[in-house]
């Protein structure tokens, strides 16, 4: 069992449907939070709601996305380079995210 599944169990026992409980957890994940006593309390860490470039590796491909959830595509490792997702991400941040 994980903490997430324990929380879902408690919410369901409290009357939430599975769908509503999952939605509530997803919303909680998006809220700003402090970094558990680490760092400067004047500047809490925000894990979502921002626009950081995220690059993940899985299933023999690199996946690019923005912290807000915008998908930036996938590439094979032999095509991956420093600017692979940077241009798409920068365009997203300058145009779509600024409105």
Image (cartoon, rainbow, N blue to C red):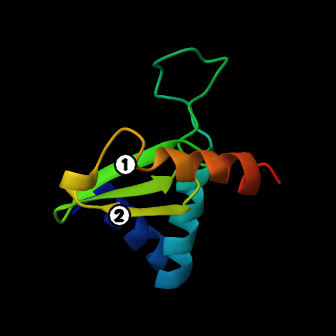
Query: Residue at position x 56%, y 62% from top?
Result: 70
60 relative to 86, above or below = below
Secondary structure category for the residue under label 2: strand
| Viewer-side label of 2, 1 | 2
Foreground residue, 90 or 31?
90
4 relative to 82, above or below = below
Instruction: Provide residue 5's location: percent of width, then percent of height.
Output: 33, 66
What's the mark number on residue 72?
none
Secondary structure category for the residue under label 1: strand
Q: Quote the CA–CA distance across marks 2 and 1.
A: 9 Å
Q: Is residue 99 visible?
A: yes
Q: Mark 1 — residue?
A: 55
Q: Residue furthest right?
A: 99
Query: Residue at position x 72%, y 46% from top?
Result: 94
Instruction: Provide residue 34's location: percent of width, then percent of height.
Output: 55, 30
> Left of 2 or right of it: where is 28?
right
**Nearest to N terminus: mark 2 or mark 1:** 1
Q: Residue furthest front?
A: 79
What's the mark number on residue 74?
2
Foreground residue, 90 or 4?
90
Neighbor class of circle 1 (other Cα within 10 Å; few <14, some 14-19, many 20+) is some
Q: Quadrant of the N terminus?
A: bottom left
Whether tag 2 and tag 1 are in contact, CB under 8 A, the answer is no
Foreground residue, 7 or 65?
65
Instruction: Provide residue 39's location: percent of width, then percent of height.
Output: 50, 16
Q: Is residue 16 visible?
A: no
Q: Quadrant of the C terminus?
A: bottom right
């Amino acid at each position: 069992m994980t903490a997430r599944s324990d929380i879902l169990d408690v919410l369901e026992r409290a009357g939430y449907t599975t769908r509503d409980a999952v939605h509530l957890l997803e919303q909680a994940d998006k809220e700003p939070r402090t970094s558990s006593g680490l760092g400067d309390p004047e500047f809490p860490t925000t894990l979502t709601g921002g626009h950081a470039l995220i690059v993940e590796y899985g299933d023999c491909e690199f996946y690019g996305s923005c912290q807000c959830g915008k998908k930036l595509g996938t590439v094979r490792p032999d095509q991956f380079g420093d600017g692979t997702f940077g241009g798409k991400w920068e365009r997203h941040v300058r145009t779509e995210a600024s409105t």
